[in-house]
Image (cartoon, rainbow, N blue to C red):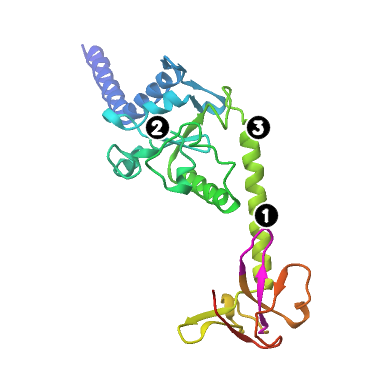
């Protein structure tokens, strides 16, 4: 009887331990089962399948199901990548400010802020955007990568049915690199030709002048106000130019009308 009692106590102990373990890991087990089922899910529009590194590959129709309606998770697409934003349902849920972005890739709307008009074929067509807008999208991408759960890729403009980057995606990334390089060069020019101080008054019009800290750049020289035209830009900004750079060919600079060549301040009226 003693032996039987010992075996019974051991069995009870083992059952208690198993119950504790299951209690701790039950949510994780359920999540794993849910992920497996999600990866195998079939819809009328294709397979919600897993690509390389367990990335989910979704069609546009499948992504649209994850829009928060009826308690569904909320996914959004950005540059062909899908993120789970369910935890911020107060922003992306039905009736909320950014619900327009839920269940779709509306990358262009991140730039235009047009949350009313959705044209499917143009919503993620970002190649027509200019360099600053492309860099803004890259910053949005960094935000979602760092703050939300990455789920997978959207089959379409950026990724093919195997999850591989398309020519469109590669072209966008090349444009993003070019935009970064362009931004770097513009910053170098701004360091070399810093902005003027600018003030406007009804009596005297626009007043521009250079100082040792104009443009927010502390330096040991002052310079002379000039109109500086950047490449592919008809507009100009007022830049402070060193004496030795007044004849530069690096950028297009022009003097202000009715202003002495070596004056460190100028006045002008905008017609």
Task: Give above or below for 202 relative to 163.
Answer: below
Residue extending farthest to the front is 271
Percent position of residue 195, x then y: 60, 74
- When asked about the image quadrant of residue 102, the answer is top left
Residue 167 tag number: 3
The residue under the point 67% across, 54% down is 181
- Magenta stretch, residue numbers: 222-236
Picture coordinates of residue 43 (x, y %)?
Answer: 41, 16
- In primary-sequence order, the first of circles 2 and 1 is 2
Question: Does the magenta portion include 114?
Answer: no
- Does the CB distance between marks 2 and 3 fall below 8 Å? no
Of residues 16 and 44, which is closer to you in this image? 44
On the image, the x and y values in percent for residue 18 come to 31, 23
Q: Is residue 267 left or right of residue 67?
A: right
Crowding around mark 1 (Cα neighbors within 10 Å: few <14, some 14 to 19, many 20+) is few
Who's the residue at 65% across and 45% down the image?
A: 175
Q: Secondary structure at mark 1?
A: helix
Q: Along the line of sight, which residue is nearer the eye, 162 or 137?
A: 137
User: To which residue does mark 1 refer?
Assistant: 181
Name which residue lies at 58% across and 43% down: 128
């Amino acid at each position: 009887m003693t032996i039987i009692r010992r075996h019974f106590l051991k069995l009870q102990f083992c059952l208690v331990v198993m119950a504790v373990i299951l209690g701790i890991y039950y949510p994780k087990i359920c999540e794993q089962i849910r992920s497996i089922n999600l990866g195998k899910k079939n819809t009328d529009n294709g397979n919600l399948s897993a690509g390389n590194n367990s990335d989910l590959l979704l069609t546009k129709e499948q992504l649209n199901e994850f829009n928060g309606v009826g308690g569904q998770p909320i996914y959004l697409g950005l540059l062909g990548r899908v993120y789970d934003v369910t935890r911020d349902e107060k922003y992306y849920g039905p009736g909320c400010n950014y619900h327009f972005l839920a269940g779709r890739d509306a990358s262009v709307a991140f730039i235009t802020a047009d949350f009313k008009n959705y044209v499917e074929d143009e919503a993620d067509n970002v190649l027509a955007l200019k360099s600053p807008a492309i860099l803004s999208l890259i910053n949005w991408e960094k935000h979602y990568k760092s703050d939300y759960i990455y789920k997978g890729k959207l089959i379409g403009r950026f990724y093919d049915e195997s999850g591989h980057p398309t020519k469109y995606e590669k072209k966008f990334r090349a444009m993003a690199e070019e935009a970064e390089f362009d931004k770097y060069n513009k910053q170098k020019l701004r360091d070399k030709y810093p902005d003027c101080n600018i003030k406007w008054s009804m009596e005297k019009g626009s007043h521009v002048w250079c100082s040792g800290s104009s443009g927010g750049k502390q330096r040991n020289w002052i310079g002379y106000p000039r109109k500086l035209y950047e490449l592919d830009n008809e507009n100009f900004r007022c830049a402070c130019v060193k004496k030795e750079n007044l004849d530069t060919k690096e950028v297009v600079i022009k003097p202000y009308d009715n202003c002495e060549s070596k004056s460190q301040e100028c006045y002008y009226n905008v017609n």
